[in-house]
C-alpha cells in the first residue's frame, strides 16, 4: 500500500510541477490558438518592433493562459498588453509591454525574463505594494520537478520606457498562495519550497510582501518538517475563530500524506500544529490522498484525520479507513464530519447524524467496487447482519454481475462510471436512510 501511494505521490508531483520536457512536447503537438482581432494587432506591433522570428509562450497554469494578457498595470484607466515570447533560436523568454495610444498599439519596452528558464508556469497581478498599480507576478518553470522560480515586477509609467518594469523580488517556490496573511491591508505571497537536494536542504515556507522601506522581500520564514517531500496547492481561510492562515497538504518521504497549518502572527509565520512535541501534526498523517478544505461550507477549513474503520485496526495493508474532517480549535482538533472517502473511485460519503451513536464500519464486497456499511460487533468483523447501506461504482464498459440481487438506485455518473446505492429492505431501524438522505451524503471529490 505504501509503495502504491508513494508512486502516486511521485506522479502527482511531476504533474503539478509540469516538468519542461512534457510541456515542450505538448506545445509541439498543439496548433497555435487563433488570435482575436485585438491580439492580432498587438502581435503586429510586436513584429514591427522586434522582428518576425518570435515564438509566443503560453502559461501552463493559472487564470491567464494566453501569451497576450491585457491589464491596467499602473491603474491609469488604460490597459497595457503583456506578451511573453522568445526570439529566434534563443531559449530566453522576454516580457514585452505595449501601450495603446489613440487606438494604435506600440512597444513600450521588452524586458528579459530569466536566462535559465524557457517555460512560463503562471502570470498574475497582485497588490503587494502600497504604490499605485498592480504587481506583475510571474512563475517560471525550471525543468526541476521540485521547485520553480517566481519573480515580482513593479510597473512605473513615470520612468523612462526602458526602465518602467522593475524586478522587485525573485525566489524559489513549489506552491504559491496569495492573500493578506498579516492583515495589513496588502497582499502577501506565501511561497512553499521543497528540499531539492542541491541548494535547499529543508522544506520551508516564506511570506513575501512589502517591507517598511517599501521594497518587496521576505517578511518571515519558517522551516517545515524535514520528512516532507512535496506539496499540493495551499488553501487559505479561517482555521478557527479569529485564526486566519493557510493549510497545505503534503506528501512525506515515506509516501504518507499530512497537513501543515500556517498562520502569520503579525509579521511572523508560525506552525500551530507543530508546537510542543508535534503530536497534532502527526495526527494529520494518512494513507489516502484526502484533501483539506471547507467541506461543509461554514467558512472554516477542515483538516482530514484518518483512522482505521472499526474492526480494521489489525488488518494491515488490507485495512479500510474512515476520515474525521476536523477543525483546529487552537489547542486540539474537533470533529465536524465523519466520512468514508474512496479516493480511487473519486467520491465521499459523509456519515449522517443517525450513525453518530453507533459503531458503523465498512467492508469491501468481493473484488468489485462495492462497499457494505454495517453495525460493527466487536467479536466478529465479518458479521454483517445489521447492514445499513451499500455503495457501488462500475464502468458501463464492464460486464455486469448477474448474481447481484440487491436493488440499487442511482447517485450520479462521471464519464463512463456509474455510482449507485442499495438500502436494506423490510428493516425497521433508525439507521436506515432514505434515498434522499443517501444522495445528500454522497458527493464527488473532483
Image (tube, grey):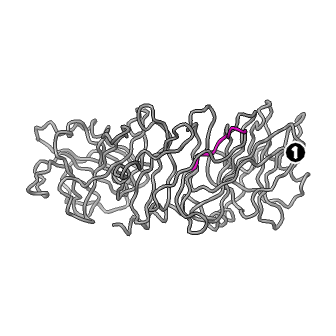
Q: Is residue 37 above or below residue 92?
A: above
Q: Residue at x 23, y 53 (%)?
A: 309
Apparent side of residue 216 relative to residue 269 in the rendered image (left or right): right
Q: Nearer the viewer, residue 162 or 77?
A: 162
Residue 155 image-quadrant placement: top right
Count of numbered badges drawn on the protein: 1
Numbered range of the magenta stretch: 206-213
Please state the horizontal and vertical placement of residue 416, each as a whole percent of the image: 41, 55
Q: Residue at x 86, y 51 (%)?
A: 46
Please state the horizontal and vertical placement of residue 176, each as a whole percent of the image: 58, 49
Apparent side of residue 438 relative to residue 113 in the rendered image (left or right): left
Please state the horizontal and vertical placement of residue 76, each as a whole percent of the image: 80, 31
Q: Main secondary structure of the magenta part?
A: strand
Q: Nearer the viewer, residue 25 or 153?
A: 153
Secondary structure beneath dot 1 equals strand
* Residue on which disc 1 sits: 108
Q: Is residue 211 magenta?
A: yes
Apparent side of residue 160 relative to residue 328 in the rendered image (left or right): right
Q: Nearer the viewer, residue 73 or 443?
A: 73
Q: Is residue 76 magenta?
A: no
Q: Is residue 17 above or below residue 72?
A: below
Q: Residue at x 60, y 32 (%)?
A: 184
| Residue extending furthest toward the left | 379
Image quarter of the N terminus = bottom left
Apparent side of residue 259 relative to residue 202 in the rendered image (left or right): left
Q: Residue at x 28, y 55 (%)?
A: 321
Residue 211 image-quadrant placement: top right
Please state the horizontal and vertical placement of residue 93, each as a whole percent of the image: 77, 58
**Mark 1: few/some/many CA within 10 Å (<14, 14-19, 20+):** many
Amino acid at each position: 500500500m505504501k509503495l502504491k501511494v508513494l508512486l502516486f505521490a511521485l506522479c502527482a508531483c511531476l504533474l503539478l510541477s509540469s516538468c519542461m520536457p512534457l510541456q515542450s512536447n505538448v506545445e509541439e503537438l498543439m496548433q497555435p490558438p487563433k488570435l482575436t482581432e485585438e491580439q492580432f494587432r498587438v502581435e503586429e506591433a510586436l513584429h514591427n518592433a522586434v522582428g518576425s522570428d518570435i515564438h509566443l509562450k503560453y502559461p501552463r497554469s493559472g487564470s491567464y493562459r494566453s501569451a497576450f494578457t491585457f491589464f491596467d498595470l499602473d491603474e491609469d484607466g488604460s490597459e497595457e498588453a503583456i506578451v511573453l515570447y522568445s526570439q529566434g533560436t534563443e531559449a530566453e523568454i522576454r516580457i514585452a509591454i505595449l501601450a495603446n495610444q489613440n487606438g494604435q498599439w506600440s512597444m513600450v519596452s521588452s524586458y528579459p525574463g530569466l536566462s535559465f528558464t524557457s517555460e512560463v508556469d503562471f502570470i498574475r497581478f497582485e497588490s503587494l505594494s502600497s504604490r499605485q498599480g498592480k504587481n506583475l507576478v510571474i512563475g517560471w518553470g525550471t525543468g526541476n520537478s521540485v521547485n520553480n522560480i517566481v519573480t515580482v515586477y513593479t510597473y512605473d509609467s513615470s520612468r523612462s520606457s526602458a526602465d518602467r518594469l522593475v524586478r522587485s523580488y525573485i525566489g524559489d517556490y513549489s506552491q504559491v498562495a496569495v492573500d493578506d496573511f498579516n492583515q495589513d491591508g496588502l497582499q502577501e505571497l506565501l511561497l512553499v519550497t521543497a528540499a531539492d537536494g542541491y541548494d535547499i536542504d529543508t522544506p520551508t515556507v516564506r511570506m513575501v510582501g512589502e517591507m517598511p522601506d517599501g521594497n518587496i522581500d521576505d517578511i518571515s520564514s519558517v522551516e517545515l518538517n524535514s520528512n516532507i517531500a512535496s506539496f499540493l496547492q495551499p488553501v487559505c481561510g479561517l482555521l478557527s475563530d479569529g485564526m486566519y492562515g493557510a493549510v497545505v497538504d503534503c506528501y512525506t518521504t515515506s509516501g504518507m500524506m499530512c497537513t501543515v497549518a500556517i498562520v502569520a502572527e503579525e509579521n511572523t509565520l508560525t506552525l500551530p500544529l507543530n508546537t510542543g512535541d508535534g503530536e497534532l501534526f502527526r495526527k494529520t498523517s494518512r494513507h489516502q490522498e484526502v484533501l483539506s478544505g471547507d467541506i461543509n461550507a461554514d467558512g472554516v477549513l477542515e483538516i482530514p484525520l484518518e483512522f482505521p474503520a472499526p474492526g480494521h485496526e489489525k488488518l494491515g495493508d488490507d485495512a479500510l479507513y474512515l476520515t474525521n474532517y476536523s477543525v483546529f480549535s487552537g489547542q486540539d482538533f474537533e470533529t465536524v464530519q465523519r466520512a468514508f472517502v474512496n479516493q480511487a473511485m473519486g467520491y465521499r460519503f459523509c456519515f449522517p447524524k443517525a450513525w453518530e451513536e453507533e459503531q458503523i464500519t465498512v467492508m469491501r464486497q468481493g473484488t468489485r467496487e462495492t462497499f457494505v456499511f454495517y453495525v460493527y460487533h466487536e467479536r466478529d468483523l465479518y458479521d454483517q447482519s445489521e447492514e445499513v447501506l451499500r455503495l457501488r461504482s462500475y464502468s458501463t464498459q464492464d460486464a455486469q454481475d448477474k448474481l447481484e440481487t440487491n436493488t440499487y438506485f442511482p447517485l450520479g455518473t462521471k464519464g463512463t462510471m456509474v455510482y449507485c446505492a442499495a438500502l436494506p429492505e423490510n428493516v425497521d431501524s433508525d439507521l436506515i436512510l432514505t434515498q434522499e438522505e443517501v444522495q445528500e451524503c454522497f458527493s464527488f471529490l473532483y
